[in-house]
Amino acid sequence: MPATWIFLIVLALAAIGYVLGRSRALASASGDSRNLHSLPSYYGSHVALYAAVPSLLLFGLWLIVQPVMIEHHVQKLIPETSYTSQGELNLLMSDVHRIANGLDYAVRNGTLGAQAARDLSTETSDIRAVLANSGVALGSDVSAPTLVAAKEYRALSVTGDSYRAIAVLALALAGLAFAVIKTNRDFRARNAVERVILSLLILAASLAILTTVGIVLSLVFNTIEFFKLYPAMDFFFGTTWSPSFGGGSQLGILPLFWGTFYISLIALAVAVPIGLFAAIYTSEYASPRIRGLAKPMLEILAGIPTIVYGLFALLTVGPSLMAVFGPGTGLGWMQGGTAVMTAGLVMGVMLIPFVSSLSDDIINSVPQSLRDGSLGLGATKSETIKQVVLPAALPGIVGAILLAASRAIGETMIVVLGAGAAARLSMNPFEAMTTVTAKIVSQLTGDADFASPEALVAFALGMTLFVITLCLNIFALWIVRKYREQYE
């Protein structure tokens, strides 16, 4: 049974349980809700939760565990002589998935019978031609071990899906029956429902924390594997970035870190003044009508996808800078449209709503009594803003700037399209450079062999970037908390 149908059936059982629980509670109270411990809706919600929550948790866990177990079992069917690295094994497993899905598609379309799909053999049939007749294209011929693995993968998936449907629906029915039997006029349904809701909230918070821990651990373990293959000193202090999957790679992070820092610095030089001045205007000078128009217009920039910003940098900003600083102008500072300045300017535009929105909220949070006191002492509006409002809001503004810096450091698409791919140490902002995030993408693009330092270096780069942005965020929060107390 498809997963969608299982989910819908569980929801339908929960809805039925709600009606049954509510009606049973009212029946036990002779139709008078005043005789119930809780409101009738709590009795219905109690049954619905018992029918839906345990079964959906099992359903979600099954969806995660089943593919992992099948993958692990099927990999054992592929002879070790068929591959020499984890990357080649991953490619073989991709072929297994493609063949298994192709057989499923052929059976569903009726071009291949279920028994014929199980009896397929590379000795009697051209598997590639059979699947091509069903509209499934394969890039290479199918070997016997790959076909066996694909058929086993398909059989285990069908069996697992059947057991999943039985287990989930049985648990939903059991939960529904248990809750309905337990329902009566004296049952404390409200307390039970609130306990279940609290447990779900704790589970949601735990999943968020565990996800973060999992991400960090995956980075840490792969970074350790990288440093077993490549010297840490050469990585952190090397001035040359020249990866080569054939060997002899130089993987120094300094050129990448310099490009990241340089582009982020230009972006902040654009975003901070414009965003801060915009925040001062909208919070202190603009009328409510103008503020209601200007603030949403500024925040529209935050909703533009970064790939659009990257295209804007590539097609508009880069050629415009070339027209001013290119070889044809006599200056010759800029040899191509992709440069640090191109990416920095566009990234700065992207960060303007980030800085302005946060700064506007922070400035508005300054107590009005401080403004009134300054104006009452004879200060002008501009003097009040400069000498009272901005100093009071400064910790929050600095925190917003540091958070914007973290956002700039982690940007990828604008850099890929606007800054180029050259890893170099240069002070010229009109030269092409690259960043840490751009190289993480390039090192993991294609059929990367995760046993090689050239692929594992992406995790070391990611871990370094994570530590830098984490430190910036912690520093921003420390500044906000330390200096905010002076004005509370």
Image (cartoon, rainbow, N blue to C red):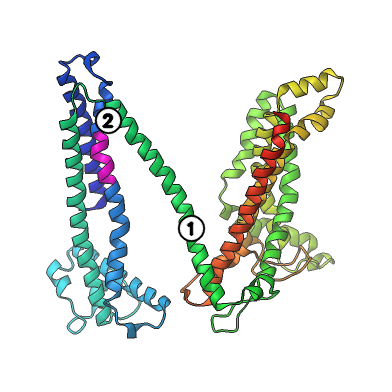
Asked where in the image residue 422 lies, by quadrant, the reply is bottom right
Residue 106 visible to an observer of this rendering? no
Asked where in the image residue 94 lies, by quadrant, the reply is bottom left
Label of residue 417 in the image: none
Element type where label 2 sits in the image: helix
**Disc 2 designates what residue?**
45
Query: In this view of the protein, which residue sits in the foreground, 83 or 288?
Result: 83
Residue 79 % position (x, y): 29, 82
**Disc nearer the start of the sequence (1/2):** 2
**Does residue 367 appear left or right of residue 26 in this picture?**
right
Query: In this view of the protein, which residue sits in the foreground, 340 or 334?
Result: 340
Magenta stretch bounds: 48-56
**Disc 1 designates what residue?**
215
**Residue found at the far right of this picture:** 378
How many C-alpha atoms fall within 10 Å of the one at disc 1: few (<14), some, or many (≥20)?
Answer: few
Residue 38 % position (x, y): 27, 21
User: Three-letter amino acid code at disc 2?
Assistant: Ser
Element type where label 1 sits in the image: helix
Residue at 20% across, 38% down = 13
Q: Is residue 313 located in the magenta-colored stretch of the structure?
A: no
Specify the quadrant that holds the C terminus.
top right
Residue 253 % position (x, y): 65, 69
User: Three-letter amino acid code at disc 1?
Assistant: Ile
Residue 244 visible to an observer of this rendering? yes
**Does residue 106 appear left or right of residue 422 in this picture?**
left
Residue at 74% across, 67% down = 431
Residue 152 % position (x, y): 22, 71
Residue at 85% across, 24% down = 380
**Does residue 225 appear left or right of residue 273 in this picture?**
left
Q: CA distance from mark 1 to mark 2?
A: 36 Å
Q: Is residue 54 located in the magenta-colored stretch of the structure?
A: yes
Q: How many numbered discs?
A: 2
